[in-house]
Image: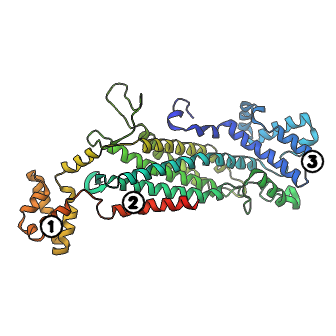
């Protein structure tokens, strides 16, 4: 990972996936395993204490482990060798109880789960911040009129609060997904050579239960060496999250275009500048979020394809996860942090929103006019009448209301009061207000249920 680009794309959580953190995760597994054996009477307590005391990443030469990993095929093999040497240097008897009943994948996968547990805590906090920020925007802008756009063209009026509520609705679903997947993900991996804990005889489950308690992890029904739906599910969740963040970023970037200028990211010294154009105010957070949304699908696809593993231990598929999942974690976390900053600092220009609506000469209200006429003329005739009026307004440079007032067929069925209601921008159109209320209510219910 690039040190130059890291501060832009990766959050402070990057340290959770450093080589030292990966090593410490495996060592935490080994220390907990020794203590679990001591608890079940399959290892002397003093031996477990000696092992645990030496399970510190700073005692190891990471560069030497890396070189040995290239020969052994995974980092747990040289780590166990080095740890055995350390323990034996103080107590040869204790060294005999090291890694007892486990296999390399147990240390690597459980170490990863411990890293992921630490990672999910700040991720959830940032997702809660994103939700809170979007909720505030939805509530504060329920009457802030803005052009709704389809196929990148103005379509019909909406309110900015509804746009924020749509993003909030997705963010709330992600919080629910995260709560649901956490208990499936944060589980112990401990199966020994082929998932039977055969070297522990009839004490396997007992030791596994003690190990899970030591690590504060759930004990799954059975080892999951070659069943990779757990990391793949996390990857899919992170892919969905970055997709939502990309959607927020795309909308913000489009609203920030010079010709639109309805919203922009918060200004700060040195932020969003150009090396040649002093006037530029580029949407930096949106760029990072969009980059994450572009990169995440390929990483998710790698995790999904890695699920097809051979028998009781995958060959290559398991290895493909090692760098892919951490990269995806950091990519999503970085995009989320920028999403929080963008939402919390967004600057809106309601006057410009109204100006852009007005610039369209009433065309955004064509649907409302057709809907009102449908009650009296039927759908097809009403649509044709308003379509003709819209074309005349466009070609003649007139406001759609003026053309409808001049049209004998329209005037016959639309009163002045009808036209006032059709072209009214003082209240949320249709059910926009109700939709905002529903999304905000669901968020309140989730928070109250915690």
Label whose residue precedes the other's in the sequence (3 or 1): 3
Q: Quadrant of the N terminus?
A: top right
CB under 8 Å between discs 2 and 3:
no
Q: Using the image, determine if residue 408 lies above or below residue 54.
A: below
Q: Give the structural element (helix, strand or loop) at label 2.
A: helix
Residue at image point 10% right, 53% down: 398
Residue at image point 75% right, 35% down: 57
Query: Which residue is under mark 1?
Result: 384
Report the Cα–Cα distance between label 2 and label 3. Answer: 62 Å
Label whose residue precedes the other's in the sequence (1 or 2): 1
Residue 11, picture quadrant: top right
| Front in this rendered view, residue 247 or 428 | 428
Query: Which residue is under mark 2?
Result: 436
Q: Can you tell which of label 2 and label 3 is closer to the viewer?
A: 2
Neighbour tally class for label 2: few under 14, some 14-19, many 20 plus, Cα within 10 Å: many
Residue 44 disc label: 3
Report the Cα–Cα distance between label 1 and label 2. Answer: 33 Å
Is residue 154 at least partly visible in the picture? yes
Residue 89, picture quadrant: top right
Residue 373, picture quadrant: bottom left
Horizontal arrangement in the rendering, residue 250 relative to residue 220 (left or right): left
Neighbour tally class for label 3: few under 14, some 14-19, many 20 plus, Cα within 10 Å: some
Locate residue 118, reporting x and y percent.
Answer: 65, 46
Neighbour tally class for label 1: few under 14, some 14-19, many 20 plus, Cα within 10 Å: few
Q: Using the image, determine if residue 30 lies above or below residue 82.
A: below
């Amino acid at each position: 990972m690039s040190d130059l680009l890291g501060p832009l794309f990766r959050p402070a959580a990057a340290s959770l996936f450093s080589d030292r953190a990966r090593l410490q995760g495996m060592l935490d597994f080994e220390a907990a395993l020794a203590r679990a054996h001591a608890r079940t009477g399959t290892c002397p307590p003093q031996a477990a204490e000696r092992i645990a005391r030496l399970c510190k990443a700073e005692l190891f030469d990471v560069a030497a482990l890396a070189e040995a990993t290239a020969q052994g095929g995974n980092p747990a093999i040289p780590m166990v060798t080095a740890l055995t040497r350390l323990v034996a240097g103080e107590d040869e008897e204790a060294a005999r109880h090291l890694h007892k009943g486990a296999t390399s994948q147990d240390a690597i996968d459980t170490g990863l789960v411990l890293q992921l547990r630490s990672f999910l805590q700040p991720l959830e906090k940032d997702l809660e911040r994103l939700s809170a920020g979007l909720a505030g925007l939805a509530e504060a802008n329920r009457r802030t009129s803005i052009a709704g756009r389809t196929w990148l063209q103005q379509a019909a009026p909406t309110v900015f609060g509804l746009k924020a509520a749509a993003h909030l609705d997705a963010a709330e679903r992600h919080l629910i997904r995260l709560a649901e997947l956490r208990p499936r993900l944060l589980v112990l991996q401990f199966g020994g050579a082929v998932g039977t804990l055969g070297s522990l005889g009839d004490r396997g489950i007992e030791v596994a239960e003690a190990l899970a308690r030591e690590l504060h992890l759930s004990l799954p029904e059975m080892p999951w060496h070659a069943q990779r739906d757990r990391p793949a599910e996390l990857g899919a969740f992170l892919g969905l999250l970055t997709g939502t963040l990309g959607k927020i970023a795309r909308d913000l970037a489009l609203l920030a275009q010079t010709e639109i200028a309805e919203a922009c990211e918060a200004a700060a010294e040195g932020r969003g500048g150009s090396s040649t154009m002093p006037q530029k105010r580029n949407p930096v957070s949106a760029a990072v979020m969009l980059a994450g949304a572009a990169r995440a699908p390929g990483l998710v696809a790698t995790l999904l394809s890695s699920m097809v593993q051979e028998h009781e231990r995958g060959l290559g598929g398991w290895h493909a996860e090692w760098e892919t999942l951490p990269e995806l974690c950091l990519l999503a976390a970085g995009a989320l942090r920028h999403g929080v900053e963008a939402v919390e600092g967004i600057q809106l220009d309601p006057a410009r929103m109204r100006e852009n609506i007005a610039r369209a000469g009433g065309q955004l209200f064509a649907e409302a006019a057709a809907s009102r006429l449908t009650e009296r003329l039927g759908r097809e005739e009403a649509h044709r009448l308003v379509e003709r009026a819209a074309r005349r307004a466009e070609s003649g440079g007139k406001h759609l209301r003026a053309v409808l007032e001049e049209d004998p067929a329209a005037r016959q069925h639309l009163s002045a009061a009808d036209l006032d209601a059709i072209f009214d921008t003082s209240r949320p159109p249709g059910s926009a207000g109700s939709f905002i209320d529903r999304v905000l209510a669901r968020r309140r219910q989730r928070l109250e249920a915690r």
